Amino acid sequence: MISDTDRELVYLLARDGRRTFASLADELGVSQSTVRTRLAKLQEDEVLQVVALCNAVRLGLRVARLLLRVRNLTPRAVANSLMGNDQINHVALIAGSYDLYLEVTCKDNEQLIEILDEIRSLPGVAAIQPILVTSLAKDYTWEGLRGTAGQSISDPNK
């Protein structure tokens, strides 16, 4: 479990990952060393990773979301076999009619075809449902964890 201070730290960094320890400490009402220590712990526990997100579609890249069905192997085993591919940005085990959700970024259609062929040839992959992203209206955000859309970052009971 993370503390209320940790939750607020995550929220503040999700809005602007470039904020200084000093500005975070001022807003949270804690010392800079507390921010530094808490941030290091959140990163170590894989709760938080501070990165720059880009809009790959606007950069002219081909972006696809892939839904995979798995057969004869566990979804976790197939997911582990996909982890080393640099073009796969996101691998998630999911519940429903599909077993895995992937996000891939390719330089062009030819590279997309190659990665689809590569994934289809993996042991355990029974089917792929590709979804091509033509425009990115909203990307990753922690806002869904606040208020009515989900659990509040600042108050886990809301």
Image (tube, rainbow, N blue to C red):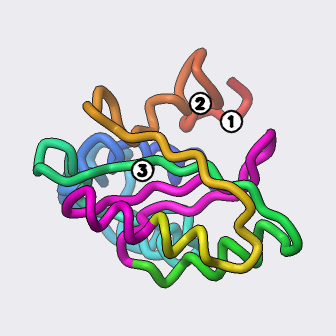
**Residue sitting at x 34%, y 38%:** 133
Locate the N terminus and report the quarter of the image it occupies: bottom right
**Magenta extent:** 86-115
Q: Earlier in the sequence, mark 3 or mark 2?
A: 3
Question: Which marked residue is nearer to the observer: mark 3 or mark 2?
Answer: 2
| Circles 1 and 2 in contact, beta carbons < 8 Å | yes
Q: Position of residue 43 (x, y in %)?
A: 47, 72
Q: Does 53 sit above or below residue 43?
A: above
First in residue order: circle 3 vs circle 1? 3
Q: Which residue is mark 1?
A: 156
Helix, strand or loop at label 2? It is loop
Alpha-carbon span between mark 3 and mark 1: 14 Å
The image quadrant where one finds the C terminus is top right
The circle on residue 152 is 2
Horizontal side, residue 21 vs residue 65: left or right: left
Which residue lies at the image location 42% right of the left edge and 50% below the top edge?
Answer: 9
Q: Is residue 148 within the magenta segment?
A: no
Q: Residue at x 49, y 69 (%)?
A: 117
Distance from Cα at disc 3 to Cα at disc 2: 13 Å
Mark 3 highlights which residue?
A: 9
Q: Secondary structure at mark 1?
A: loop
Q: CA distance from mark 1 to mark 2?
A: 5 Å
Mark 3 is on which residue type?
A: Leu
**Amino acid found under the numbered disc labelled 2:** Ser
Residue at (74, 55) in percent of width and height: 69
What type is the residue that disc 1 sits on? Pro
In the image as oriented, which residue stretches furthest toward the left? Answer: 59
Q: Point out which mark residue 49 bears.
A: none
Residue 19 at least partly seen: no
Report the number of numbered marks.
3
Task: Let me know if residue 113 is in the magenta part.
Answer: yes
